[in-house]
Amino acid sequence: MFIRVKKSKNSPKRSVQIVASYRNEKNQPRQRIVRHMGTAFTEEDVTRLKDLAEFEKAKLEAEITPALFKPEQLAEAAIEARKKIDDEPINVNLKDIKEQARITTGIHEVFGSIYHELGFNNLFDKRKEAARRNLRHITMARLANPVSKRGSVQDLSKDFGISLSLDSVYRMMDGITDDIINKAQKHAHKAAKGLLGDEISLLFYDCTTLYFESFTEDELKKNGYSKDMKFNQPQVVLGLLSTSEGLPVGYEVFPGNQYEGHTLHTVIPKIKEKYNLKRVIFTADSAMLSKANLDYLEEQKVEYIVAARLKSLTDQWKAKITESVAPLRSFDYGKNRRLIVTYSDKLAKKNKHDRDEAIRKLREKLEKSSNPKSLISNYGYKKFMRVTGEVNCEINEEKYAQAAKFDGLHGVITNVKDMDDSAVVEHYKQLWLIEECFRISKHDLKIRPIYHWTPKRIKAHILICFIALTCARNLAYRVRLRFEAMSVARMVNALNHVQLSILWDKKSECKYVLPSKINEDARKLYKTVNLSADTTPYKM
């Protein structure tokens, strides 16, 4: 392949072309124009077009060289070759070296190792190899940079040397059945048991809402109480189960208008059926507290630790728990239940600050306008309201004083008999780990908003996010034990900077890999999954 400048008869213009030599069927030498770069009228224009042609020629040579790999083969071959580094010296002339590609490998190597170890590579039947591959790559893309499926396909091609078709990704999602979803949750549960020494007795449960970029409801997407304050958009309710160490073990998807307290009647039987645990101490926040729910848990012989709504108790109970202040008090709540109330100065200061701040903002609004309509938050309904007659708005100081009595107080209700009050409270405090799972899902993995419309694809999207969350929490747990605590964002950032440059020697037609410098966080993550983080260049 060479660059040719062709002159035109009776004209000052010259054409700059990239030309390739070949032999025809009769073995006669011939030439063909590979690319026409443009037409020039001055020497300066010719020089610029020749420089551009040199750049294009180098790319074309890399593309058509038979010894090179296709994009997906390139990434996987580079990763595989790293495992077989030898001490053979590399003798090359740097002037003959061209960079063919630069790919990010940290995500696929480290999170890919976790993904494989947890068994997620076997969710699809062996005959569906393309679906297996697509699920793995889309999960890695979700961890690296959570965007739409179209954006993930583009990122995989641009940054990871992996070529997927968007249609094949959608076909994979359409092939995800309830059996595959159940199988993934069994793998997550098995992995948690393996890390915790086959001992899981404490399960945390909580619900959140996931909204859609849509205003159309169906049997799954329903309008309901939105924790994301998207009351005019349909949603689904996601119930998540995790261990006390924050390792996800399962989940359920409910219609968007499902009251989260009523999800227990679905979740509890499935816990017994799926996990076959000798003992479960069910732990949840106050949204799960109702007389009917507590009675139901006891009927099912399930032990529980549930947050109490202290301000919703009877006047007799409210007087009893506010008459004195102590770090920890325990009350017999009837039916073998305990009400444990704790007090914290830090929480008391926060409660007072939050209430005073709300009152300050309310006073500002009242000073500007006494119209009650101006005090109503606008969720799209305010425009339909009309205020008639004379209305006077003022702050109820008595209610303020009553609320102040509960500053610093927190309560839990439990039926666990063989655990002292302090241990019960400590177990409940670990509930923040499942809240962190939701935070990771919503912010780091961007599980919502959801852009899919059919129930099948919605469930497939949630499964992909659950697998990504399980891999992330699994790795976070391990690296915390071996080195130090790392957030998901910190782990992903470190691994996104682990890259390889694929170099091509145009004379020998050999390929070499030049690993990037690896930072300390990435080194710890590689060691956590027992992988080498060697930065020595090697031959493919």
Image: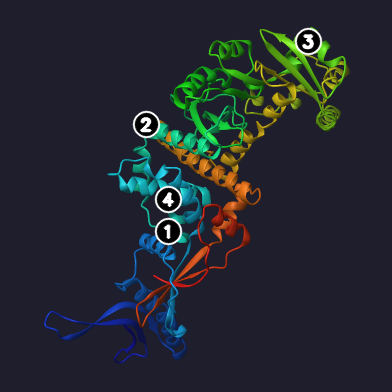
* Tag 4: amino acid: His
Please provide percent x and percent y for residue 302.
Answer: 56, 17
* C-alpha gap between disc 4 and disc 2: 21 Å
Residue position for label 4 = 137
Asked whether the beta carbons under mark 4 and mark 2 sit within 8 Å of each other, the answer is: no
Q: Earlier in the sequence, mark 2 or mark 1?
A: 1
Q: Amino acid at mark 1?
A: Ser
Q: Nearer the viewer, residue 6 or 73?
A: 73
Dot 2 crowding, Cα within 10 Å, few <14, some 14–19, many 20+: few
From the image, tell me which residue sits under label 2. 179
If you read the primary sequence from the N terminus, does the residue marked by circle 2 or circle 3 appear first?
2
Label 1 sits on a secondary structure element that is: helix
Report how far apart the C-alphas of labels 3 and 4 lie in the structure.
Answer: 55 Å
Local SS, label 2: helix
Q: Which mark is residue 157?
A: 1
- Asked if residue 276 can be seen in this view, the reply is yes
Mark 3 sits on what residue?
317
Splitting the image into 4 quarters, where does residue 5 fall?
bottom left
Circles 1 and 4: CB atoms closer than 8 Å:
no
Q: Amino acid at mark 3?
A: Trp
Query: Regarding mark 4 in the picture, which secondary structure is present there?
Result: helix
Determine the CA span between mark 3 and mark 1.
62 Å
Residue 452 at what x, y percent from top left? 44, 38
Instruction: Please rate how many residues cluster around mark 4, counting C-alpha atoms within 10 Å: few if below 14, some from 14 to 19, many from 20.
Output: many
Left or right of residue 23, residue 71 in this image = right
Give me the residue at 31% from left, 41% from top: 125
Looking at the image, residue 415 lies above or below residue 10? above
The numbered mark, 4 or 2, whose residue comes first in the sequence reads: 4
